[in-house]
Every structure is written in C-alpha cells, then in structure tokens.
Image (cartoon, rainbow, N blue to C red):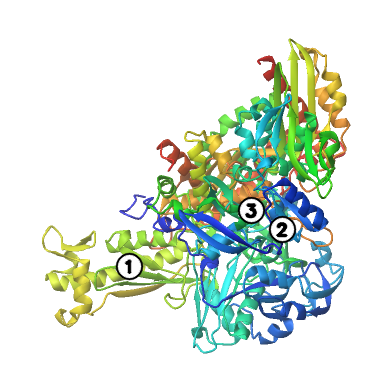
Amino acid sequence: MKPAAFDYHCPDELAGAITILQEYGDEAKVLAGGQSLIPLLSLRLSRFDHLVDLRAIEDLRGVSAVDGSIRIGAMTTQAHVARNENAAAVPLLARATSHIGHYQIRNRGTVGGSLAHADPAAEYPAVAMALDASLEVAGPNGTRRISAANFFMSTWATAMDPDEVLVAAHFPVWSGSTGWAVDEVARRVGDFAMCGAVCGIQLDGQRVNRAALALFGVGSVPVRARGVEATLTGATVDDLDLPAIGADVAATLDPPGDLHASGEQRRKMAKTLVPRVLTAAIDEAKHA
Amino acid sequence: MTAGRFMGQAIARSEDPRLLAGRGRYIADVVVPGASDAAFLRSEVARGRIVSLDVEAARSAPGVRAVYTAADLNPLVHETAVAGLPEGPFPPKYCLAENDVRFVGDPIAIVIAENRYLAEDAVELIDVDIEPQEPVLDVDAARNGDGALVHPEIGTNTPQVIPFFGDPDLEQAFADAAHVVKDTIVMHRYVQAPMECRGIIADCDPYSDELTVWSGTQSVYGVQSLIAGLLGIGTNQIRVVQPDVGGGFGQKMAIMRDEWAVVLAAKLLGRPVRWIEDRRENLTAAAHARDERIDLSIALDGDGGITAIQGEFIENIGAYQTMGSSGMGAFIAPFLTNAYKIPKVGFASQAVYTNTCGKAPYRGPFLMYAVGIEQLMDAAARQLGVDPLELRRRNVIRADDLPYTLPSMLCFESITPAETLDQAALMIDYDGFRADQRAALEQGRYLGVGISLCVEPSGIAVGSMATEAAEIRMDYTGKVTVAVGSSSTGMSVVTTMKQVVAEHLGCVPDDVNVIQGDTAATPWGAGTGGSRSAVLIGNAVAAASTELRSKLLEIAADALEAAAEDLEIDNSRVFVRGTATKGMSFADVGQLAYHSPDMLSPGTAPGLEASHRFKAPPFTFSNACHICTCEVDIETGRVSILRYVVSEDCGRMINPKVVEGQVFGGVVQGIGGVLYEHMVYDDDGNPLTSTFVDYLLPTAAEVPTIEVGHIESPAPNPLGVKGMGEGGAIASPAAVINAVADALAPLGVRISGSPLGPRQILDMIAAASGQRA
Amino acid sequence: MREVALTVTVNGEQISRPVEARRTLADFLRDDLSLTGTHLGCEHGVCGACTVLLDGDAVRSCLMFAVQADGAEVTTIEGLSEGGLTPIQAAFQAEHGLQCGYCTPGFVVSAHAFLAEHPDPSDEEIREALSGNLCRCTGYQGIIAAVKRAASNGSSL
C-alpha cells in the first residue's frame, strides 16, 4: 500500500507555496499534517503530481490574541492548540481536540489541515461554525477573510480556490459567564462522529445572553442551529425544555446514512446530544 | 491441583525481551539477498469473464523484473492439496485467475520488481478488461441453484452437504414437548485480522538441491506439503522456515493462491521473490470467517428439561476457500448439545459457495455449536418465565452424570460445566446484578446479563492432526535443546515447553532452548491451531523429557556407582538421595555421555537423546462459562460492557498467565466480533469495509477488565492438560449477545445473532416499538 | 523533485542521504536503516504498530513521509531499548502484556510518550491513551496492567 510518486516542494515562504499551486493547479496538493492526506495517497485513492509541504513556512504557525479573537496559525498542531495558553480563551478548541482521533494523530494533525479538509464528521469545522470563526486565506490576489458559514461548501469542499492556502483561523472570544460543551456519538474512542454537537452558552444571571450550537456528522457541512439559538437567547435557564429543544433541532436535520447509522438514527442521536451539551454548558456557565 | 516447581507457575516469558526491544524478526524483516518484491493485480469485480489482459507496459516499467499471469504460472501447478487434511471437493486448482474472476480481490497477475513501490506502480500499468457478470452473493439463491455456479468445474454451489440425519424418535420428541423454542441464529461475516498480515519469501535457487521458503505460517509442514505438491518435487527438497509470526488465528494455517504464485514466480525467475501482504489485501482478499446461520429448535418438557435439539447449519464459504473450510457441519454435529444433557439430536448442513472472499478457519471455526444453543437457552428461559441461569442449571451436565456419552457417541469423561457455571455466577454476583438491573430499569436504564457455556473440543487430534513430536537432547555441556514440530504464532510455545522440560528433567527453564518453526530442524507437526499446543506438544515434550531423564539417570548411576532409583535431580544436578555431596552436574553427565563413552558400563548407551511422538485422543474436552454484563444506551445504540467474567477449566495449567492471555484474547475477539467487526459487501459484491477505518477492531477503551477463575479437572493424558486457545472465542459471542438481548427484552426486542452495532440495535428497538426506522 | 536530500537524527545518530519523497518514514526506518522494530500493521494510520517518537512526540510513522522528518530527532523502539529493557518494557513482561509481539513496539513507544506527560494516570485515562494502538492477541488486559504498573512504580523511562 505505497503512494504513487510525486514531486515534492517545501517552500519557506507562503508566496512560494501559492506560486506552485498556481502553476500546477489540480495536479498539486498542499501537505499539512498529512493525517488525512497520506492514507488517501497510500491507498492510491487520490494522487497528485506535486505535493507542497507547508512545514517550513513560519508565518503559518503561532497562536495569538488579535482583535477579540484568537488567531490560530494553520500549521498549528491539534496537540499544540489543546495546551496553548492563548487558545484557552476559546475553550471549545481544547474540548473539541480531545475527541479528535488519538494523541499520535493530534501530534501531527493541524488545525488548518482539519478545517481545509472539511470532513463532515470533523470537530473543528463545527467549532468554527458555532463561533462564527473567520478563515484567513491567501492566494495570488492577496489575502481575504471568509466567514465559517461561507467557508464550508460541501463534503471535503471549501470556498478556497485551488491556488489558495488557508493561513489562519480566527475564533472570537466570549466574555462573562460562559459554559462550553462538545459531545459526540462514535463507534469507538477517536472514531469519526456519527453525530456530534458543540455549544456555547453565555449567561447573565439566570438569563441566556448568548447561545451557539452546531452539529456535525449530520450533513455535508456542519449545521448551525440558529433557530434554536434564537429560542435560547433571552430565555430563563430553568424554564428551558431541553428535550423539546433537542427534538426541534433534530426535526431540521436530514442526515445521510451509512454502515454505522441510518439518517434517521443520526437524527435521533442529535435529539439526545443537544440536551446533553446544553445541560453541560449551562451548568458550567452557572458556576463560572 | 498443586503446582509443580515450574508446571503451573506464572513465570515470565522468555520470548518477551527480544520482542519488547523490537528485535523480533517477522517475515517482513527477513532479508534474503537479491530478493525482489511482488505486488498483485486483483479483480475489482466479483464475478466476470477476463476478456483481455495486457501486461506489456508493466513488464517494461522501471525496476520490474517480471510480470506473470495465469498463462505463465498455472501450467506449472501439479497439485494443490495439503496431504492428510480431510476435505470436501477442493476449489479448482487455479493459481492465478485464468479465464474468469470469482471474487473482488481474486489475483490476476503478479508483478515482481525491485521494491513494493515500483511493483505497485507497474500493477497500475496492466491493462485488464473484465466483462462483469451477475455475481452470486445470496447464500440461499446460491444453494437453490438460482443463478450461476461460482466454481463451474465443481458442478455445484454446495460442495459439502450433510443430509438430515437424527434420532428416529426426534419428531415425536418435538411433538410431545411442553415447549418448543426455535430461531434462526445468525453470525455475520468477520475477518481474522491478525496484527501482522501474511507474507512469504521463496528462494527456488535452480543450482541448489533445496528450495527455501520463509513463511509467516502456523504450519511449516503444511506449507512444505503444499509446495511439494505445487511443484511436483519431494518434500525433502523443501525447507520451510517460520520467522516470528504476528498472530494467525487460523488465517495462516495454510498458504493461499497468491502465496502459491510467489513460489511459482520464484521458480520461474530463478531468484528469490518476497511478498508482504498489505492490510487492504488482508481484509478483502485473504480469507474471511463466520458468515453462517443455524435454524435451531429445542424441545423442552414441563420442567424445562431439554429433550431434543435439531439444527440446520448453512455457511457461506465464499470462493476458493482455504483448506479446512469446506464445511464445518461435520464438526458441529457431534457437539450440538454443548454442555447439556439432551438425548436426541437431528442435524443437517450445507457449505455454500458465493462470489465473495473465501473462508479460512478462525479461532473456534465450529463455534456455532455453542453460539446457537446458548442464545436459544436464553430465549427459552424468557418463554418459560425462568431465569436463564436456572434453566442452564436444570440441563447442564454434572459430575454425577460423568462419564456422559453424547448422542454422537463421543464421551465426556472429565468436564466441569456445572462447576464453572456456579463459579462464574459467584464471580459476577449474579443475584446482585439482577437487583441492580431492576433498579436501573426503574430509572429508564437498560442493563443486561448474558451467560454462555461451552464444552470445547480442544487438543484437536483428528486425522493428520493426531500427533505431535518432540526431539530432546542434552549436549556435552549439560544444556538442553528440544525441537518441536509445530510452532508459536503468539501462544507461548517456547516458554511453556521450557516449563514442561524443566519440570520433568529437573533443570531450570533458562537451561532449555526450544527449536521450532523449521522443517530442517524439527520433527513433523501439523501446525498450531485447534487448541493443540498444550495437549499435543506438551505431552510429546513431557514424554521425551521423561525418557531423557531416565537415560540421564542411567549414566549418572553408572558414574556414581548407585542404583538409578536412589538418585534424585534438582537444579541440573543429579545426586544420591540423602547425600549432598555424592552427585554430579548435568554438565558432568553430558561430558561423560559424549566425550568419554568408554567410561560407561557395557550396557549403558552413550549420548543423551530422546524423542517421542504423542498421539492424543481425537478431542480433549475442556470447558468454560462466560458471564457478561452490559448497558445499552437506547438513544445511541451503544453497548458498554460493564463486567466480564470467565470460569474456565483447562485441566492442569502449564502457565496460568499464558492461559489467561489466551482467554483474554479470545474474549475480546468475541466482543469485537459482535459489537464492532462487520465485514460488509455491497449488492455488487464489493467489500465496503476494506480498511481499519471501517472494519473496526475493539481497542483498550472498549473492553472491560476480564476476570478469570480457574477450575482444574483431570485430563486423560499424562501431562493432565487440556487446550484453551479457542475457548475464549467460542463462548464469548453468545455471552455478549445474550447480555444485549437481556437488556433490551423489556422493550420487546428479540435478538437472533449478530452483528449488534448501533445501527442494528436502533433498528431493532424501533421495530419492536412499531415505529418505522 | 522526486528525490530530496534528507538530514535526520535517528536514535542519536545523524543520517544524511537523498530519499525518494514518497517513501514513508516507516519504510525509511525499516528498509533504509534496517530498524525493523517499527512494524507495519495497516499503513493507513489506525493500528499504531508503526509508532515512533518524533522530537519526543508519539507519531504514526506510516503517516509521514521521511522527508517531513528533515531536521528532526526520531527515536524508535531500538533507540528506547539501547541501554537494556526500560522499566516500562519490564512491566510489559511482568504483566504478560504481549503474545505475538507484533503490536508491542508501537505500544511501548506510545506508553513511553504517554507516561512522560501523564505520570499518574487514572484507569480511564490509560485505556483512552492506549486506544490508538490495536492488539489482537492479549485482549489488552496485560497491556493495561503493564502501563498501570509502570505508572505506579513512578518510572516513566
């Protein structure tokens, strides 16, 4: 199970990477952590004549606080972001990370790689959607920002052009009494989620000031439950009928089915997960 | 049974240090100078006619040394049987697919190149045109003659049929029964999936008298025999060497068509050829397992005593099945009554070909004898309103019933299923669990307990598997070497045999070297499998050691001028009983035996060598009871195993930790098989679970702590041992299935086998509640 | 370029040589450097038999190209065992944490990395940490016991 041959490029500047992508188009692919790409290459399910390794580009690393958000360089590893002090200001990041595969994968897998790969069952895209993250993308025409809602187009498809590189992801920081939760239903520890949910709650006393809820594994892109967020916002915590909210969210979903669970079963899992994550986040916010 | 100085001791394994340090030498680590690497072109179609095959582009690809197809290799084939194995009609003797392909993965061409990377590149350049034909995938369609023949040359899709036979009063027994419980119990398709894939290196040097094959096999002599037939040469011209092997579980008992191609290619090429299987091949094109069902009925009297059992067993053996997989019916029939007193039996079976990957044996290949009845017991208990533990107690064979002759005329002389049932129930605190279960149900939580008993026909010694031999010698320095004919793929043959030698000879295990896995250096053996090692190899080693001991004493008696009966041995030293000083070391004896034979009395033979070929009865019955508790999350379909206990009786244990390790491994394969591992084909015969991403093995996070209790009953062999290699795998599936069924019974869910992934569980819950899934 | 210059330190020894870009780190270690203790169980990043330490972190060497390790320090099972069996390896032996041994180097390397960061793990943490390595022989019982034993002995290296 060996990969087909390719020309290897390891530019030390972003501009160099973009130039190569421009030149070779479909025949070139960016290599970040390789945890998703390399198995595909080894199984010869995909092949590219050119691989552009981003590991030497220092500009793609680093976690910093920028304008009320945490900016995560695309090549930051998942393991690093989970223990980074700056990134702790966005608790969903560390919590989502613990669900990703196993620590051996997280030592190599990158935040940018996961976002750009856009697997429907991945955790970071859902976190990005839930928090209205903004993706910083560079191409031949310069750098632009794409909101998470516009970034994830479909299974393994993003709004980036073939000659663009994801440079960083900006995750807004919430202040005040906040609580967060990530939960998923998977066959085994570390497996792709059959259904997952991420949420954030900001309380003002007993009142929900702000709510964010996104589901993954239930469609070709993460699903943001804006309708339910509207219901939650302004409500008194103890008045909430969480099971009903779970049912409401589930009713909006039309998930695909596979060997592991049918679409209807995924919908039912969502119905169970939503109250679980909301309960956990609310509890944390109450004690914050 | 009291432990001996070494027998019965949980000593550390001598295999471990080198394996821990990464110094194991598995087939992919063996370096044969000048060896090329092979890769295969395999069919991507389940059934079809090969219209054209053009390998010219591959032949001229970089680094390619040869490309062979059926036209090159198949005419070289003489025979493809393994001598001595009882079999139904073999599949046709095509090494590579000749005019048609019969399963996805069927090997069509072999590319031999400088390395695997280049070989795979060249495989992509082969131009093959296959005209797809409707594959035969459904077992019932296949056996009923709807559709094509998988192997037209065989003339039937059912190569092994056991027509119904049974007790003449069977029908009456069912008619008179107070209760009849029947169901069709299904076991889905799984894969053996040892951590190490298959591999072979063949060196057929035309200038050498001997061809050498390194094979990651469970049976070096099986490989030797097959290659002798394949090439039409004498077995004494073939040396088969087994390196360290990373697990076999039955998949490596016999080499398969792709491995034959490597040998033939090496012969044609005149240079060594190496093939290391990759995981996708291992999961889709090596061999599969289980995929069988049994229509089972039991008749019970008013007290819940089972009076009769009847079963029809249908198994899907795929295409080109491996030796030993042409029909498990013959092995299931005699044991259909499992651990219970059931006087009347009826049985029929069919093995059916389909256009899927062929079967090879997998740890307890006949396990349906236990898996079926154990599930039916629980179903019967529910039907009768009796606790499943109680129902088993009413029917289980007890000490008073021994010796117990089965309807199949086999006789259980020394088994303890009733005792293991009691011990396991105690270990799990059965009544305590039932109370917890009731309390949990009131809170809307679904807990369940599952029992599974099995009497295991271990130490399989049928036909050519009836014997194993050991050749032991003490050399001129007093050090001991023992050579055995069947060799370890993880089951600790080396350490356990060192313990046997040390116990019988009076030395320490570290003074013993065990030689295994080389036809040039060991006596003939049938291979490790069938839970044979302790019974067959153990007794052979014990007998040879005992014989060596008496030769040792004879020579020492001579030298010490004492009677042999007055001598004792301890710690590699022979001495006159009662004296500390009148003695000699093994080294002294060895010296005398080899270097100074003139000093021996006229009647005393020089040298210190002995051998023994041990013949065991066809089966040595061991037994176990497994009890498993679980919780089912009815929202997500997830099953969590809470506790798992095993009470096992394998007679005298050579090494308790080794026994437990075998049980642990088998249990987790059972848990994995039921809850996670599911080999799936789509409607066109394409395997959908072709990597570990989709074929899910359980990890440390999915298994509980497994608790093992031991009972030791006498065994009918000098060493007093029984086998336990497969017992863990045989009893576990039903324990898990029964636990899930018990948990979901309040919801009206009725379970009839496996798989039990979340999808299946949620489907069943929805169906039971009348909703559409 | 199909072939790339690689400089990598493996078990303390600096290696400089050209290597084909597509060659995985696992194959480079096994075939180019004859360090065959690192095993291939799946080549798609699930089984963990190929685990090595890269700058001290446990990684799956089948999911890296050798060239990606340029400038890094790689430690294989051979490197860990250079001075004799480590306390973790001794714990594996004491608890019968191996049978066929094929998955063992991957587990040992992973356990080293895990215990270095979590010297006092709970049972659940141990099980989760071990969930990235597959074993078919032991049912994980001896492996979990070995890691527990090594942790409670306070020796992670």
- Give neighbour class at mark 2: few <14, some 14-19, many 20+ (Cα, 10 Å): many
Image point (34%, 49%), residue name: B2
Provide residue B364's location: percent of width, then percent of height: 59, 58
Quadrant holding the C terminus of chain A: top right
Q: Nearer the viewer, residue B401 or B467?
A: B467
Quick check: C21 above or below B11?
Answer: below
Residue under label 3: C63
Callout 2: SS = helix
State the CA–CA distance, disc 3 to disc 1: 50 Å
State the CA–CA distance, disc 1 to disc 2: 55 Å
- Give neighbour class at mark 3: few <14, some 14-19, many 20+ (Cα, 10 Å): many
Same subunit, labels 3 and 2: the answer reads no
Camera-side mark, 3 or 1: 3
Q: Is residue C106 visible?
A: yes
**Lateral position of residue B451 relative to residue A21, left or right:** left
Residue under label 1: B545
Provide residue B291's location: percent of width, then percent of height: 71, 58
Quadrant holding the N terminus of chain A: bottom right
- Give neighbour class at mark 1: few <14, some 14-19, many 20+ (Cα, 10 Å): many
Same subunit, labels 1 and 2: the answer reads no
> Which amino acid type is marked by label 2?
Leu
Quick check: B254 above or below A100?
Answer: below
Callout 1: SS = helix
Residue B507: quadrant of the picture: bottom left
Q: Residue furthest top?
A: A205
Provide residue C156's location: percent of width, then percent of height: 44, 41
Residue B641: quadrant of the picture: top right
Image point (30%, 53%), residue name: B5
> Which amino acid type is marked by label 1?
Ser
> Which amino acid type is marked by label 3?
Leu
Image point (42%, 50%), residue name: C93
